[in-house]
Image: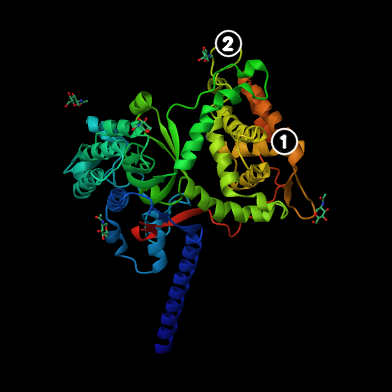
């Protein structure tokens, strides 16, 4: 009897150990999907006051985390993590801001935790569609209110009341920071933002944000994106991103944007396909390094660009701004693209897989190239390319921007308008980048665009695979000949608004040949997470 008991106990014990080990192993693998990068930056060149301002803004950003934890879990980070002791559970919860895996369809990774509530803590947990529909309150669809139960009735509460303690602190800090700003535009923005957080009315501060142009410190702070609300897609999550403008690249983009008319004239297409005036898209674009990220933008996988504001009224009145985040692109390049390229690019050409003058330059010219080509059909009907091509529009437009960007760089290099240019850096980095983009399939427009161009260039012999080594290498001369041909092919398709031809091209060329292109992604991270802190900034 006694022995029996011991055996059972022992079995239970072993079982338990086994279960824990298993879970730990799995969690460790999940954590290893992310490469850790450090948000460090030399800020010693800033004025004394601007340094102080950055420090205050950094501290304000951290408070945003408390609000986002409440929005997600109904509890602060400390209150939630209190229940867990093992290091990996805590670490992965911090990465995901809760117990649901953002890289795996929000599946819970802690045993005993239920499904992620679609409405998070924005709504009562047990709310139904019918109940929401019946609720007669104009504030229920407002992005800056939570719904709560008051006995049997629903009610709306403004964010500035629900998160009053945190909001007041953040608001006060933004006001304080504004008094140290060396840039008048940024000072005015911070003041308006400070007030906006207290009444959840963001129009004025968003408009001022679009008006300021000369600030070298930048902050995106407040309730902004509504992706986390899977019940109604209405409620905005708190986030804060503190950024430092890259003045050299921001200046370069301005210069290249001013050359759009000249390039439009020199597109490799028939006259009728270049009769529209080139225009840089409404709004503006700057390059930044990220130095702090808290709240929604810091959860799970990271974006390398921000496009704001979301308010359609501000968009109409002032346009939008695109923030290109260079240090995050560099991190993804180093941690993800380089290891992929090592497996696929011929060792003799691997030296051309470079960041600044290759990959990053390509991305910048992709954005600029969106402003070139045709927006309306050439038949004079006034129908836009977007309307004509419907679902085929986006992949084609992205494919155009990719290859036209490279055409643009080639043109500038041939005219000696970019100095010390080795075009192979752009060509090889572009091909290597394709292998990264198609990692998660080709269902999105960017990935599809990548395969269209890849297959076109491959067919043309612009690069080839060595069947012995399985490495790819670019043929410079053929690549240079293929680029204008591909540009021509896409712009003509767009200008004619030929939906059938677009469909056929995508059906035929929109996927990689799995026998020809075999990519082993094992052991290569999927995304990045941040190590951040004031101690990583050099003041
Ligand atoms: C920012 O927070 C840190 C850590 O809490 C604190 O030591 C520092 O004094 C704060 N800085 C400012 C300017 O408030
Ligand atoms: C909704 O509320 C408004 C204002 O309180 C009221 O006038 C209206 O009759 C209500 N509608 C319904 C369907 O209860
Ligand atoms: C930015 O600086 C330029 C040049 O110094 C100046 O002309 C312009 O008015 C400034 N813009 C704003 C919004 O402060
Ligand atoms: C292009 O710009 C020129 C000069 O600004 C203008 O005269 C012309 O009407 C514009 N063409 C189109 C198609 O918008
Ligand atoms: C393929 O690579 C091998 C090994 O480097 C080389 O000997 C061969 O010449 C290459 N084949 C072609 C067609 O370039
Ligand atoms: Zn694009």
Q: Which mark is residue 500?
A: none
User: Dot 2, how many residues are within 10 Å of its Cα: few (below 14), some (14-19), or many (20+)?
Assistant: few
Which residue occupies the foreground of this view, 180 or 174? 180
Q: CA distance from mark 2 to mark 1?
A: 33 Å
Circle 1 is placed at which residue position? 480
Is 34 displayed left or right of 100 in the figure?
A: right
| Residue 408 horizontal/vertical position (percent) | 61, 32
Q: Quadrant of residue 135?
A: top left
Q: Is residue 462 visible?
A: no
Label 1 element class: helix
User: Dot 1, how many residues are within 10 Å of its Cα: few (below 14), some (14-19), or many (20+)?
Assistant: some
Q: Quadrant of residue 365?
A: top right
Q: Quadrant of the N terminus?
A: bottom left
Query: How many numbered marks appear?
Result: 2
Q: Residue furthest bottom?
A: 2
Q: Residue furthest top?
A: 380
Q: Where 298 falls versus 372 (above or below)? A: below
Q: Quadrant of the C terminus?
A: bottom left
Which residue occupies the foreground of this view, 190 or 147? 190
| Residue 526 horizontal/vertical position (percent) | 53, 53
Q: Where 200 falls versus 333 (above or below)? A: above
Circle 2 is placed at which residue position? 380
| Residue 93 horizontal/vertical position (percent) | 38, 59
Choose mark 2 or mark 1, whichever is in front: 1
């Amino acid at each position: 009897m006694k022995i029996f008991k011991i055996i059972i106990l022992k079995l239970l014990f072993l079982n338990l150990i086994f279960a824990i080990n298993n879970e730990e192993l799995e969690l460790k693998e999940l954590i290893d999907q992310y490469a850790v990068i450090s948000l460090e930056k030399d800020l010693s060149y800033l004025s004394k006051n601007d340094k102080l301002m950055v420090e205050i803004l950094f501290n304000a950003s951290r408070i945003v985390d408390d609000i986002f934890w409440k929005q997600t879990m109904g509890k602060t980070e400390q209150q939630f993590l209190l229940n867990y002791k093992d290091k990996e559970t805590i670490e992965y919860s911090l990465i995901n801001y809760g117990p649901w895996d953002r890289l795996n369809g929000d599946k819970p990774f802690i045993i005993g935790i239920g499904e992620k509530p679609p409405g998070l803590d924005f709504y009562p947990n047990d709310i139904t569609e019918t109940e929401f529909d019946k609720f007669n309150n104009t504030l229920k669809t407002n992005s800056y209110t939570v719904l709560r139960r008051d006995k049997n009735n629903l009610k709306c509460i403004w964010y500035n009341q629900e998160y009053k303690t945190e909001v007041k602190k953040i608001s006060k800090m933004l006001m304080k920071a504004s008094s140290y700003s060396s840039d008048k535009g940024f000072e005015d923005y911070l003041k308006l933002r400070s007030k906006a957080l207290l009444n959840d009315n963001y129009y004025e501060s968003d408009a001022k944000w679009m008006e300021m142009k000369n600030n070298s410190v930048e902050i995106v702070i407040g309730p902004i994106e509504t992706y986390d609300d899977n019940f109604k897609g209405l409620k905005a999550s708190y986030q804060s991103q503190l950024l430092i403008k890259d003045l050299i690249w921001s200046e370069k983009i301005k210069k290249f944007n001013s050359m759009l008319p000249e390039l439009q004239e020199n597109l490799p297409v028939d006259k009728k396909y270049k009769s529209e005036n080139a225009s840089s898209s409404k709004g503006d674009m700057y390059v930044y390094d990220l130095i702090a990220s808290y709240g929604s933008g810091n959860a799970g996988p990271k974006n390398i660009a921000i496009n704001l504001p979301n308010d359609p009224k501000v968009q109409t009145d002032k346009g939008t701004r695109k923030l290109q985040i260079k240090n995050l692109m560099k991190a993804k390049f180093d941690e993800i693209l380089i290891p992929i390229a090592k497996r696929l690019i011929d060792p003799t050409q691997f030296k051309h897989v470079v960041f600044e003058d290759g990959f990053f330059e390509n991305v910048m010219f992709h954005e600029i190239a969106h402003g070139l080509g045709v927006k309306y059909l050439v038949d004079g009907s006034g129908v836009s390319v977007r309307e004509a091509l419907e679902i085929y529009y986006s992949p084609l437009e992205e494919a155009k921007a990719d290859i036209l960007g490279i055409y643009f760089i080639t043109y500038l290099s041939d005219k000696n308008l970019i100095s010390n240019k080795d075009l192979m850096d752009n060509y090889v980095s572009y091909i290597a980048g394709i292998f990264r983009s198609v990692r998660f399939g080709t269902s999105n427009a960017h990935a599809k665009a990548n395969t269209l161009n890849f297959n076109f260039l491959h067919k043309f012999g612009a690069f080839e695979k060595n069947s012995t080594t399985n490495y790819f290498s670019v043929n410079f001369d053929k690549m240079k000949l293929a680029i204008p041909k591909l540009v021509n092919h896409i712009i003509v398709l767009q200008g004619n608004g030929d939906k059938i031809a677009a469909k056929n091209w995508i059906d035929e060329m929109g996927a990689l040949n799995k026998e020809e292109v075999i990519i082993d992604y094992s052991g290569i991270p999927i995304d990045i997470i941040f190590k951040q802190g004031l101690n990583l900034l050099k003041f």
